[in-house]
Amino acid sequence: MAFDYKLTRLDASQAIVGESPRWLPRQNSLIYLDIIGQEFRQYDPITGAENCWPLEQLAGCCIETSDPQKVLLAQQDCLALFDFTSEMLSPWCPFEPENLETRGNDGRVDPQGRFWISTMNMMHEPRPAVGNLYSVTANGIATQHMGGFRIPNALAFSPTGDRMYFSDSPNRSVWQFDRDPPTGALSNQRIFFEFLPDESGIPDGASVDTDGCFWVAVAKGGARVERRRPDGTLDLVIPTPADSPTMCSFGGPNMDQLFITTLSKHIPEKDRANHPDQGALFVVETGHQGLPEIPFPIEPE
C-alpha cells in the first residue's frame, strides 16, 4: 500500500532525536525539539530560516498556547513557558520534580483544552516501566490517569474527542480508549492495531486527520509513516529515507502538509554528516487535512 508520495528534506539542522513537530498557524512556522541535543527550534518553511535555542534540560514535547508569543515545553522537573519575545524559558508548574530520572515525553492538548502529557525514564536502557500519563488544566492542576509505561507515545484524539489513542512503544501496538470529553475519564482500553512479527519498527508520535484516520511514525528501523483507518486497518504507507521517523504532524496554510521528524542517534557522531537523511526534518503533501492543534489555554499573568 505504498503510494508515490514525494518527501522533501527541509533545510533544517540535523537532530540527534528530533521530536514534537507542531505547526503555529499564527506565525506560519513549525516548532520542534532535538531532545538529546537539548534544543528548541522554530523553522520557517517559506524562507528556510531556522532559530535554535539551547535548553538546560531534556524536553520531550512542545505545544502552542493561547498566547501567540509563548509555547509550553515538557521538561524533566517542570512544564516551562518559552517566550519568543524575550527568548527566555520560565518554569510554569512542577512536573514529577521528586523523580530525577524521568522527563516529559509525548503530549497533546485535547479538544477541551487539557494538556495530556506522558513521562518516561531517561537514565536506563532498557527503559523501566515507570512512565505515567497525566492531564493538566490551565491553572496547572495535574491528574494522573495511568502508569507503568516504558516509552509512552502515539498520543492523539479522534475529531470529536470521544476516543484517545496511546501506546507504550516497545509493545509494538497502539491502544484505543473511550473518553468522556467533559471529564477526560478513560475507559474500555483495547488494541487499536498491532504490528505483526514480520513487520519492522515500533509506533512513535502520531496525529489524526479530519476523516478520523490515524497517522503514525514507525521508528526503530520502521522507516515509514502509516495511515490507519478509524477501525485500525492499514490505509496507506509513506516510506521515509530516515530509518527512524519519530513523529508526524500536520501543518501548512491548509493543514495538508505532514511534517516528519527523525533521529540520528544510532549513527556515530563523526559519521552523521555523511547521513543527512537521519535526523532530518521532512515534509510531504498528503492530500489529506489534519486536525489543527488546540492551543493550551494558559491563564494570563
Image (cartoon, rainbow, N blue to C red):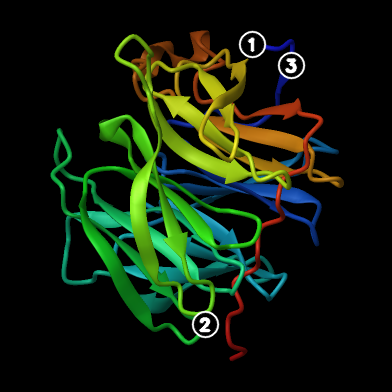
The x, y position of residue 168, in whole percent, is 30, 42
- Where, quadrant-wise, is the C terminus in this rendering? bottom right
Measured as percent of width and height from the top left, residue 232 is found at: 51, 34
Q: Which quarter of the figure is the N terminus placed in?
A: top right
State yes or no: discs 1 and 3 in contact (Cβ < 8 Å): no
Where disc 2 sits, the SS reads: loop
* Residue type at tag 1: Ala
Q: CA distance from mark 1 to mark 3?
A: 8 Å
Q: Is residue 227 left or right of residue 221?
A: right
Is 78 located above or below residue 21 in the figure? below
Question: Residue 35: horizontal and vertical position, in percent?
Answer: 41, 43
Image quadrant assignment for residue 66: bottom right
Sort mark 2 into few (<14), some (14-19) or many (20+) by Cα contacts within 10 Å: some
How far apart, in angstroms, are the residues tagged by discs 3 and 2? 39 Å
Judged from the image, the secondary structure of the residue bearing numbered disc 3 is loop
Residue picked out by circle 3: 5
